[in-house]
Amino acid sequence: MKSIQSVARTPVSIRSTRSLTLLAMCIAVLVVLSQINIPQPAGLSITFNMIPVAIAAIALGMPGGAIVGGAFGLISFLQCFGILGYSAMGAALVNVSPFLMLVQRFGSRILVGILSALVYRLLSKTGMNHKLVFTITGFSAAFFNTLLFMTTLVLLFGHSEYMQGLMAGRSVLAFIIASVGINAVVEMVVSALVTGGIATALRKASLL
């Protein structure tokens, strides 16, 4: 297999024209994808916003992942107020605590971008085929998004009347599995495949 390191491009500065262009493209795609949500029970939805976060993490490392992850989180937070989409769960929980909702929606997504970049950095040093590394990074972005979103949701809002109603006496684990089982699988598979394809195409075009 051909190692990423053996064909590595010159590192891209986060301040370069190319990096700013990639950031703008990722955020623009993010805004479009924010309008494509497939509603699911419990006020959740299937979303593919992790794809541009993964692309930014691959192309621009932790700074790029954090910026696009933050943009994802900001859009998610604004959707609690019906801006750039609508989140039924967010609309209910933002009344409990706008600050905690900002932490849950915005803070967790910044961390998704950082962790995805870390996964890419570590895998790129193993000599693994570049497309497989891109694919795993896309998968990890969706995985971290589900993990951090649900963890912070339960920790910050599990005591609320709204969440207690959704949990209906079930354990935290049972609630999470019932709420995101299908969502998580679809998001991880799509994010993995699409990120792998897009990142490979960008690399061939010398944009990575």
Image (cartoon, rainbow, N blue to C red):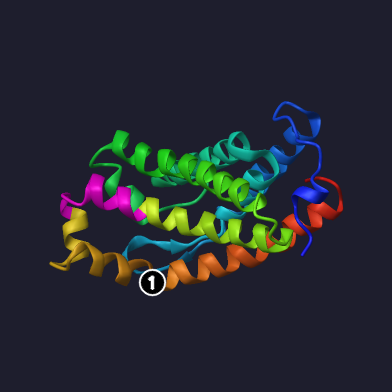
Residue closest to the eye, 176 or 124? 124
Residue 20 within the segment the image draws in magenta: no
Q: Rate crowding at label 1 as few (under 14), some (14 to 19) or many (20 or more) other CA atoms within 10 Å.
A: few
* Secondary structure at numbered mark 1: helix
Seen as rendered, the residue at the extreme right is 205
Q: Position of residue 105 (x, y in %)?
A: 40, 44
Seen as rendered, the residue at the extreme left is 169
Q: Amino acid at mark 1?
A: Gly
Q: Is residue 60 left or right of residue 92?
A: right
Q: Is residue 88 left or right of residue 174?
A: right
Q: Position of residue 186 (x, y in %)?
A: 51, 71
Segment tinted magenta in the rendering: 150-161
Residue 150 seen? yes
Residue at screen point 73% across, 58% down:
130
Dividing the picture into quarters, in which one does residue 127 lie? bottom right
> Where is mark 1, residue-wise?
181
Residue at screen point 44% across, 63% down:
45
Residue 31 seen? no
Residue closest to the eye, 204 or 71? 204
Residue at screen point 25% across, 38% down:
97
Secondary structure mostly taken by the magenta-highlighted segment of the chain: helix
Residue 132, relative to residue 6: is it above or below?
Answer: below
Q: Is residue 3 left or right of residue 136?
A: right
Assign the N terminus to one quadrant of the image: bottom right
Residue 157 within the segment the image draws in magenta: yes
Dividing the picture into quarters, in which one does residue 166 lie? bottom left
Seen as rendered, the residue at the extreme top is 15
